[in-house]
Each structure stands twice: as structure tokens, then as C-alpha cells.
Amino acid sequence: MEIEKPYSLSDYDKNEAEQIEALMAAAKEPYPDPVAWLEEEIERNVLLTTTEHLINLGKRFSVWPNTFFPACCAFEVISAAASRFDFSRFGMEVLRPSPRQADLMLVAGTVTWKLAPALRRIYDQMPEPKWVMAMGACAISGGAFRGSYSVVPGINHIVPVDVYVPGCPPRPEGLIHGFMTLHRKVAKDKLLKKD
Ligand code: SF4
């Protein structure tokens, strides 16, 4: 006995053609990308920067000062390091008696000509990159003792100075402002120098 088909072959073809035409009509534009969230994730979680910026960030927040404190300004450095001002917040609590482990020469006090060769030798022994801060009127210009036969009229006669912190003595806030100034300078350091 022959089974009756629900539709003829020509009906079937017509039906299929209609489906294809409907799909073609609806397929003018592609469906939106189902992983569009990926772009959002990348925007939120991927940070683009330069190697230079990252290295400078590391240098800024790990400045280790040496201890070249020949006179009374030193007490303000001690105060800046203690709990009230706490300069370890800036990653610089590691005061180094050895120049080979320091990258900041912090000169806090009066420098005499007798002391000058030691100052220069310590500077020469510090590895690159290195910076110098002159703290207080004496280190900057000889201060109250300027003109004396024995006093250096500013440590910039012996070593290049990056930051000057004025005062007699400068308060710890002044010293911390000097550190911030140094940080801004370090942030602009170039990895590849022309010289
Ligand atoms: S600047 Fe003033 S406080 Fe500092 S070492 Fe000279 S005399 Fe002392």
C-alpha cells in the first residue's frame, strides 16, 4: 500500500526556497559580536604604558639616601624620618651609610673644605643613576658661614646638585617637598640618553 505524502515534492522545494529567501532577507547585517564584552574587559583591565615610565616609577619610589649630615640640619632629617612625617611613605626609609647602596646624596649641614674631598669621593662611589640634594642654607651657599676661609660656599662647587631645599634649617615639610621635587625630576628621566 502506498503511503500518502503530506506534501508533494514541488511543495517541499517551494517551502525550502521560501525559507532561504527569508534568511537572505534577514541576513543583510551580521549579528553583533557575542563577545563584545571582551572590549569592555580590555578597557577596564589592560593598562598601556612605556618601559621608561615603569622603570622611572620604580626609581622614584625606592630612592635610598646616604647619610651625609655634617651639621644641625641633620636633626630635621631625623624628624622627617620619624613617625610624624615618616618619609618611608615614599619608599626612602633605607638610609645607607655606604655610598655603593645609595642613589641620593642628601647633604644636610655645613661642608668645610677639609670635608670636601670626602664628599666628592662618596659621590664618585655612588652608582648611577644618582641624585644630590642640598638641604639648608649652609649646603646651598655656605649659609651664615659663607665667606669663611674654611667653609665651602655651596656644595654645587663640588658636585652637581639636583634639588635645593632652602631654610636654616628647613622644616621636615620643606625636606619632603624637596623629595617630591626630586620625584618629578626622576619621572622625566630618559632611558636612552644622548650623551
Ligand atoms: S642651614 Fe642652619 S640649621 Fe642647617 S646646618 Fe646651616 S646653620 Fe645649621
Image (tube, grey):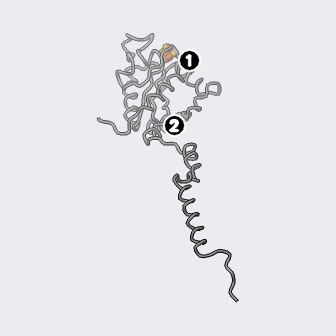
Question: How far across and how far down the image is residue 75, in percent?
Answer: 56, 21
Tell me the SS state at disc 2.
loop
> In the image as oriented, which residue stretches furthest toward the left?
195
Query: In the displayed structure, does residue 87 sit left or right of residue 127?
Result: right
Vertical order, 26 against 140 (above or below): below
Task: Tell me the residue at 55%/47% (across/down).
Answer: 39
- Residue 27: give x, y in percent of width and height: 54, 56
69 lies left or right of 7: left
Element on which disc 1 rests: loop
CA–CA distance between discs 1 and 2?
A: 22 Å
In the rendered view, would you say 1 is above or below 187?
Answer: below
Question: Which numbered disc covers residue 17?
Answer: none
Instruction: Residue under label 2, please give it.
Output: 62
Provide residue 38's location: percent of width, then percent of height. 57, 50
Q: Which residue is mark 1?
A: 171
**Residue 1 sits in quarter:** bottom right
Is 33 placed left or right of 6 in the picture? left
Residue type, label 1? Arg
Task: Give the percent coordinates (x, y) of residue 69.
Answer: 49, 25
